[in-house]
Image (tube, rainbow, N blue to C red):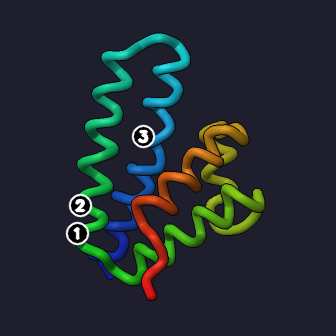
Amino acid sequence: MVLLLSFTLLFNNYLNIFPHPFLFRTTDNSEQARDSERVAKRTALLIEKVDLPEVRAIVVQMQNSAIFNTGDYKAFLEKWGYDSEQKQAIVNVLTTRFPPKN
């Protein structure tokens, strides 16, 4: 249970920092964009290496919340002020980095 909670927090951290490179690029802050991308890549790599079914469930929940604006992560997305373009970017990255398993 503690491990799952740790990875849930790690995943939330990943989602919280992921759109920031996009935001920094739009505000022409390339150094912050690079730093944020580096942290996001490292966090994603750790999540991928662990590959827990529970983490994959969180991926699906986040994708559904970003696509349909409902579900478990709706409040998270609203709290941090993600707009539709950022939500689409999250969906794209999650689909690419965490493809469904057969």
Residue 66 point in image, percent of width and height: 67, 56
41 with respect to 24 (left or right): left
Q: Secondary structure at mark 2?
A: helix
**Residue under label 3:** 17
Q: Nearer the viewer, residue 48 or 80?
A: 48
Q: Secondary structure at mark 3?
A: helix
Residue 29 point in image, percent of width and height: 41, 13
Q: Residue type at mark 3?
A: Ile
Identity of the residue drawn at 36% across and 71% down: 5
* Disc with the residue nearer the chain's start (1 vs 3): 3
Q: Secondary structure at mark 1?
A: helix
Identity of the residue drawn at 52% across and 13% down: 27
When the figure is inspected, residue 45 is found, relative to residue 4, above or below; the finding is: above
85 with respect to 35 (left or right): right
- Mark 3–mark 2 Cα distance, whole angstroms, equals 15 Å
| Nearest to viewer (mark 1 / mark 3) | 1
**Residue under label 1:** 49
68 with respect to 49 (left or right): right
**Residue under label 2:** 46
- Is label 2 in contact with label 1 (beta carbons under 8 Å)? yes
Near mark 2 (Cα within 10 A), the count class, few <14, some 14-19 or many ≥20, is: some
When the figure is inspected, residue 54 is found, relative to residue 32, above or below; the finding is: below
Residue 53 picture quarter: bottom left
- Mark 1–mark 3 Cα distance, whole angstroms, equals 19 Å
Rendered image: mark on residue 102: none
**Which quarter of the figure is the N terminus placed in?**
bottom left
* Disc with the residue nearer the chain's start (3 vs 2): 3
